[in-house]
Amino acid sequence: MPEIGQRNDDGLCRLGIGNLANRRGTILDRSAVKGGYLRIGVIAHLKHPIGEPFAGGLEMHTHLLCRLLRAGGHDVTLFASTRSDPALGVEAICEETAVLEVGTAEATDVAFFREHHAYLSLMTRLRRSDFDIIHNNSLHYLPVSMADTLPMPMVTTLHTPPFCWLESGVRECGAGARFVGVSQSIRAGWTRVREIDAVIPNGIDLQRFQYRPVAATAPHLIWYGRIVPEKGLHHAIDAARVAGMPLRIAGPISDQAYFAERIAPRLGEETRYLGHLDHEHLAIEIGAASAFLCTPCWDEPYGLVVAEALACGTPVAAFARGAIPEILTPDCGVLAAPDDVADLARAVQAASGLSRKACRQRAETACDAQVMADAYARLYTNLIGQRPGLPIANDRVEDRLSA
């Protein structure tokens, strides 16, 4: 077993903090940030590894952000689960053998407890670290509620509308915490809870979603994403049949019961499931389609799948929910009334005739991940400049008892 902060051969650091400070009560030297290069700690969520094939948009966003920040010369450490991509500088904070040392017999939800323990341990350790900034991408209540205990600023990206656990943590955090929304829709949803400091739209790697100027000879539609009820694949199947066009489906089956009961019985020659594809094969399938169907049954916080389709030159027919209307313009997509299959079928027919070149241009203008990463880097620098000379936390047990 390696020392705390020491990397194994597979690139993972087991429950360690790579830059633990041994100084006690000293001042964090911000002059160490030279040439604009920062020491950044990124906190991921733990339900799925941050690696391909991605379980969903949050995993892809976190992976891409870390990769671009590292490519820009920043020293990035990603705190995630053990099976995450080691090329991102992963330090695993949720390893089974570690949390098994803490009793779970009394825990009614073991997965919930292990996440709680992993984040509590991490936030306690970060109090003695010398990162310049922490970026919280976790959606968990503990990092936000403990933000004010850290010696460095922390920014939290809100990828979802308010829900009880995260809202509780956001309400409890101090005034020093900073929040970013991924869309104006998310900003509006959180306004009653906490002021959002900035909106930085998500982005995609445009080079990995190659533009295809002409769709496949045989017209067909595509739907892709996590196969769960809230993504509305059943609506896409209905709309494709009303429109009289074949449908191809791709993505991980994240709800087996939903797939078995509402999707599998309807598969056939005209409605085919392609599996959970990697980036390369997914981009090929998207680009071949005449249009992409986006059918959320909730207010989509951003809509990375919409950006990906546009990058491939594929027009979009989508329910007008959440942030999707912020991405689409009339020359690259057609909106339909939410949950209205007939209106979605109309949108499919209209979208199929849109300019594929206009779709790609919209992606380049509004969905470039490099623009997103640069915006976060500027935000980090501004936040560090606003909080100079922060003390490293004194976490010695004897001092806590005598204080």
Image (cartoon, rainbow, N blue to C red):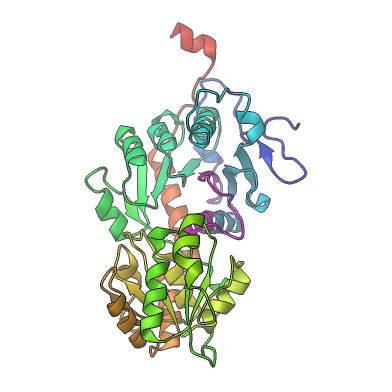
218 up-or-down from 33: above or below? below
Residue 41 lies within the magenta run: yes
In the rendered image, which quarter is residue 170 located in? top left
Name the residue at the left extreme.
Answer: 192
Q: 106 or 164: nearer the eye?
A: 106
On the image, the x and y values in percent for residue 231 come to 40, 62
Q: Nearer the viewer, residue 256 or 57?
A: 256
Quarter of the C terminus within the rendering? top left
**Quarter of the image where the N terminus is located:** top right
The residue depicted at 42 percent of the width and 44 percent of the height is 139
Question: Depth check: 181 or 50 in front?
Answer: 50
Q: Give x and y (percent) for residue 386.
A: 38, 41
As drawn, 334 above or below 167: below
Say if residue 373 shows up in the picture.
Answer: no
Answer yes or no: is residue 22 visible: yes
Q: Quadrant of residue 5?
A: top right
Residues drawn in magenta: 36-62
- Report x, y in % for residue 190: 27, 48
Q: How many marks?
A: 0
The quarter of the picture where residue 327 lies is: bottom left
Name the residue at 39% across, 65% down: 232
Residue projecting furthest to the top = 402
Instruction: Please report the residue visible at 40 percent of the width from the left and 68 percent of the height from the top.
Output: 234
Residue 252 location in percent, x, y?
54, 61
Residue 82 or residue 260, whichever sits in front: 260
Position of 121 with respect to 233 (left or right) is right
Residue 167 left/right relative to 221? left
64 inside magenta stretch: no
